[in-house]
Image: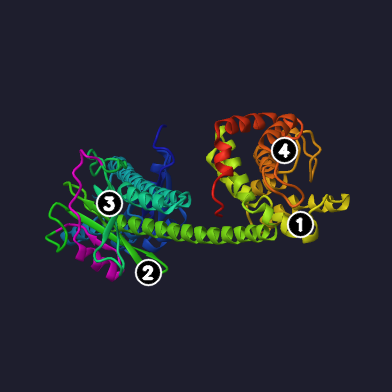
Amino acid sequence: METEQNQSLLIVDDEDSILEVAQEYFEIKGYDVFIAQNGLEALEILETKKIDCCFTDINMPEMDGLDLAENIREKDNSIPVIIMTGYPSFENTLRTMKNGVVDFLIKPVDLNQMEICLKRVLRERQLFIENILLKKEMESKARIEELNRELLARVEELNTFNKIMTDFSMVSNSSHTLSRAIDMAVEITCADASGLYIFNDALEKPFKVVSSVGSPDNDKDAICSVAGAKESVAPAGEPGDLLIKDIASDRMPLLISQNKGVSGLPDDVRSFMAVPMKIREKVFGVLTASLTRNGKRFNEKDLYYLSFMTQNAAQALENIALYEHIYENLFSTLYAFVKALEARDTYTQQHSTRVTEIALVIGKEIGCSKEEIDILNFSGLLHDIGKLGIPDDILLKPGRLTREEFEKIKEHPDIGADIVGHLGLWDQEQQLIRCHHERFDGDGYPNGLKGLEIPQLSRILSVADAYDAMASDRAYRRKMPEEKIIAILKEGAGTQWDADIVHEFLKLHSRGDIKKIIDMPETL
């Protein structure tokens, strides 16, 4: 016989005859039936068995049916309880309602009536459980959506932080850092305008050095884009000098979510933020962001982003200033070495400067990149710094060098590259200095490199160095006539020097560009 699948009943009554008849009837119908003679026995069964419905008498020893119903309700309110009693009363009816009883049968109970009641109650229980599960599913879905929103917000926040840190790690100079700071202020806060005001004791009032205006199409739901200052966008009114000074003096970020007549803030500025920019705890500027259109208002999160960005911008400025200071000191030290070298040999004064200028015009003529030009400029001035390691009696010898003395002279490219290397500079500069006496045919020094094995910048420097050496008075000879120098360069093209570089040099020479360098004043 078809019945509900594996549904279980608990029948509680102190009359054995009722338990036996009911158990037999419902087992025949296909139910799993458990019986108990009082409430305590029933609770023990509930501890170990899954029960779908409970029929219970009211008046029983140990624990009556109403107390049992209350215990079941507290344990699992999805189990329906049906009360059976031969003595119904208004008081018992009220108690059953309070205890969550779903139906009330009067003894003697007809088994068919019990079954009809059971089926109805089980259908209602199924709907109840489904509603509970649906509610839990909806709550779970809502929680998942909430977690997703939180996750997306966190990802967006991390992306913003990463963008800020990445952008300011790539800036190369102070002006770029300041411009990027105000552009990013507009970008990350969707501001209508941003400005950076410099303020210190030497200035009578704050001075705005840079500003940025957001796109007029931005609204509170739009993705921000930095458009820079545009004539078609009316900039927001600027905060007053006293307000900027107060912010700098307080040294704390300021958030005005809604402008209600704040002193020093124009009426067209509806929302405003400002963050002091500090280096080593000293305020040197104030970065501001303004909203002038309806809708969006700045909040604490916007201020947090702006503060984080300003801190990174200030750190980048400090690092650039420190780097530039160290670099300037380093260059000054190295150039002092060059001056010391030239002071030892009056014949070679200004040689490094002229070689560098000649190499630069050749490099620009053949299309070297800005980075390559910078490398040529630095390395050209220091290409002979290794001669500091050559004894005076060899370096300044007026006559022809012996084989041993020339071998000593040939050490200066390696010595110079090592000096530069120990100061922590890049490999390209070292390589250029090390290779400027290599020959295109492989007979040069110190490593006997050949052809394109020699770095192009070294090949450029080699031509410039050779020309100036022949065009200058040396300890062992006077400078050569220009015609002879040009003849030697032409003859050595493809053997001592790269023929293409010599060709470019001769073009510059015929235009008079090289003569301008040779004739320039001696000022290093």
Range of magenta residues? 230-259
Viewer-side label of 2, 1: 1
Q: CA distance from mark 4 to mark 1?
A: 29 Å
Q: Label 3 neighbourhood size at 10 Å, few (<14), some (14-19), many (20+)?
A: many
Residue 98: give x, y in percent of width and height. 22, 59
Badge number at residue 194: 3
Earlier residue among tags 4 and 1: 1
Residue at (69%, 36%) from the top-left corner? 485
Outermost residue to the right = 403
Q: Would residue 137 be counted in the magenta stretch? A: no
Q: CA distance from mark 2 to mark 3?
A: 22 Å
Comparing 404 with 374, the one in front is 404
Q: Secondary structure at mark 3?
A: strand
Residue 315: give x, y in percent of width and height. 44, 60
Q: Which residue is mark 4?
A: 454
Q: Secondary structure at mark 1?
A: loop
Badge number at residue 282: 2
Q: CA distance from mark 3 to mark 4?
A: 51 Å
* Camera sees residue 485: yes
Q: Which residue is mark 1?
A: 396
Viewer-side label of 4, 1: 1
Residue 426: give x, y in percent of width and height. 63, 50
Earlier residue among tags 2 and 1: 2
Tag 2: amino acid: Lys
